[in-house]
Image (cartoon, rainbow, N blue to C red):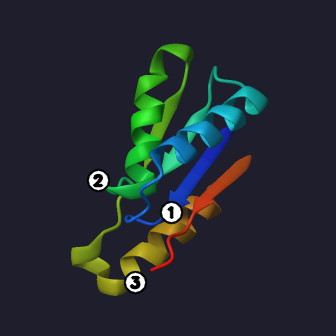
Amino acid sequence: MARLLVAGSRAFKHRFLVEEQMELAALDLGFTGLVVVHGDCPTGADAFAKHWALFNYGYGVREERHPAQWDKFGKFAGPKRNREMVDKGADRVLAFPHKD
């Protein structure tokens, strides 16, 4: 079972780029048993990763969501969540930052 961690800005708008890179990673790592790890943000890179994982569920892809706990940790919730995702390990990481 391979783990693909997808992270990026909630403002990232290039859905095709995210899905294309995920597809390439899945072809390399294998679809069956692939776990897509993401931060579960409803917009940006996380949303694109979630959609791709759900779309490919029939090929053996699963998702692992790590929503940030903003109410509990305030502005540190995002970095804390990201650290937890990294600490669980990944076979591949795709990062999609956004420049303002």
In the picture provided, is 56 more to the left or to the right than 69? right
Pointer 3 local density, CA inside 10 Å: few below 14, some 14–19, many at least 20: few
Residue hosting label 3:
76
Image quadrant for the N terminus? top right
In the picture provided, is 27 more to the left or to the right than 56? right
In the rendered image, residue 94, in percent from the top left (x then y), is placed at 64, 54
Q: Nearer the viewer, mark 3 or mark 1?
A: 1
User: Which one is nearer the viewer's eye here, 31 or 20?
Assistant: 20
Callout 2 amino acid = Pro
Q: Earlier in the sequence, mark 3 or mark 2?
A: 2
Q: Nearer the viewer, mark 3 or mark 2?
A: 2
Mark 3 falls on what kind of element?
helix
Can residue 48 be seen in this snapshot? yes
In the picture provided, is 98 more to the left or to the right than 25? left
Mark 1 falls on what kind of element?
strand
Decide: is 67 above or below 30.
Answer: below
Q: Disc 3 versus disc 1: distance between alpha carbons? A: 16 Å
Q: Earlier in the sequence, mark 3 or mark 1?
A: 1
In the rendered image, residue 76, in percent from the top left (x then y), is placed at 40, 83
Residue 42: numbered disc:
2
Asked which quadrant contains residue 12, the reply is: bottom left
Pointer 1 local density, CA inside 10 Å: few below 14, some 14–19, many at least 20: many
Q: What residue do we see at 54% from left, 46% from top? A: 18
Pointer 2 local density, CA inside 10 Å: few below 14, some 14–19, many at least 20: few
In the rendered image, residue 43, in percent from the top left (x then y), is placed at 32, 56
Asked which quadrant contains residue 85, the reply is: bottom right
In the picture provided, is 23 more to the left or to the right than 99? right
Decide: is 5 above or below 82.
Answer: above
Residue 45: numbered disc:
none
Residues at discs 3 and 2 in contact (Cβ within 8 Å) = no
Residue 8: numbered disc:
1
